[in-house]
Amino acid sequence: MNFEKLYQQNPNFPNRYIFPEKLFFFLQTNLGDYINEIGKSYLGKPVYQLTIGNGDINIIAWSQMHGNESNATHAMLDLFTTLDKAPDLKAELFSKIKLDFIFMLNPDGSERWTRLNASDIDLNRDFHNEASKEIKLLKEAVAKKKYDYALNLHEQRTIFTTDGIHPATLSFLAPSENVERTITENRKKCMAVIASVYGKLKELIPNQIGRYSDEFYPASTGDNFIKAGMPTILFEGGHFIDDYTRAETRKYYTIALYYALSAMTELNSGTEGWEAYLEIPENKETHYDIIYRNVKLNTDHECVLDIAVQYRELKEEGRDEISFIPFVMEVGDVKKRKGWKEIDCTNKKFICPTKYPKLDAEVNFFIED
């Protein structure tokens, strides 16, 4: 079954940014029979968990641990929109699994469109300190039952490719349990699910599926959950050519989520086919958003160089839209990197109030023919 042909986007959330209150209202109005509030954020916003299914395979997942990573929230909303149009498929899936999905674990950061929560804590590095209310809520939810699988859902920057050419639109990881990166039975369970998803997705978006670094992070959530015995799979939504709003990534994120849940029903904690996970190419850090090539600076001496630019995402006050602000990341010989957009500035004039573009500053120059 090709889930891509069934896919439908939830029309209530067309933009990348999601107002928390809008999400809360939608959940209460449309999924009220399945949700319950499991606690409140630092600023007192509700954190909702959806529970659906009556199967024997217990799965927990969470979205927007980092507030500026909305693809997983969209994917879950889109998954329900799609399955509502295919009731037999929906009934079959949820007869085999019981899914607990925590929407927008970090609603304060989601509202401000920041990685951190309102007390400036990265929830994904707070597992042991428990300085944030939100990581405590997640750990309490996990402790309530024995889960067969967990899905730790994130997004990654546009800098990653699978091969130096194609963007890593989706990347997956079976996290390590130790610094030696031992391939344990629990990692094999995760690898088997990912391998199954990869087998389907590589036909839809060839060369755009990557494997995230399996370096062990002692303070991170996924590494500690799998170390404690719960098979945990990392999703990373990434770049799709000419799609900074990540609408295409959102689509394939949803498809991957469905195929992962389906694989869990088929494998049922088995490890068959896990070896194919190792065939997935590792992420490579190879790109900037824009590279201006062969820029001749306005200096007294001959100075021709490259300028690398990366967008930063800022939320517009009162609007559900994201602005992409270009910042200078590197100036000089940038031959080891590529740009998703490259501009040849040979024989063009560099217009800038300063002689040199300032690093880590908003772009204040332009190129004139």
Image (cartoon, rainbow, N blue to C red):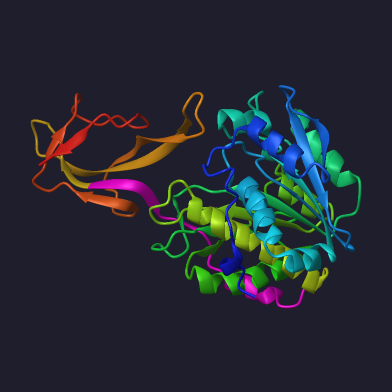
> Quadrant location of residue 134?
top right
Look at the image and tell me in which quarter the N terminus lies.
Answer: bottom right
Tell me the residue at 82%/35% (across/down). 37
Up the image or down, 46 lies above or below 239; here it is: above
| Residue 164 image offset from top left, x and y in percent | 40, 62
Q: Nearer the viewer, residue 360 or 108?
A: 108
Up the image or down, 304 lies above or below 99; here it is: above
Tell me the residue at 64%/46% (across/down). 73
- Please check the rendered image and state whether residue 64 is part of the magenta-colored stretch, yes or no: no
- Please check the rendered image and state whether residue 276 is part of the magenta-colored stretch, yes or no: yes
Q: Nearer the viewer, residue 113 or 163?
A: 113
> Quadrant location of residue 303?
top left
Left or right of residue 97, residue 72 in this image: left
| Residue 347 image offset from top left, x and y in percent | 8, 46
Look at the image and tell me in which quarter the C terminus lies.
Answer: top left
| Residue 141 image offset from top left, x and y in percent | 85, 42
Up the image or down, 79 lies above or below 349; here it is: below
Tell me the residue at 86%/55% (across/down). 147
> Quadrant location of residue 202?
bottom right
Up the image or down, 1 lies above or below 130; here it is: below
Tell me the residue at 52%/42% (across/down). 16
Left or right of residue 306, residue 169 in this image: right
Question: Magenta stretch?
Answer: 271-292
Q: Nearer the viewer, residue 338 or 244?
A: 244
- Residue 277 in sight: yes
| Residue 28 image offset from top left, x and y in percent | 76, 37
- Residue 184 in sight: no
Left or right of residue 252, residue 146 in this image: right
Q: Nearer the viewer, residue 89 or 70?
A: 89
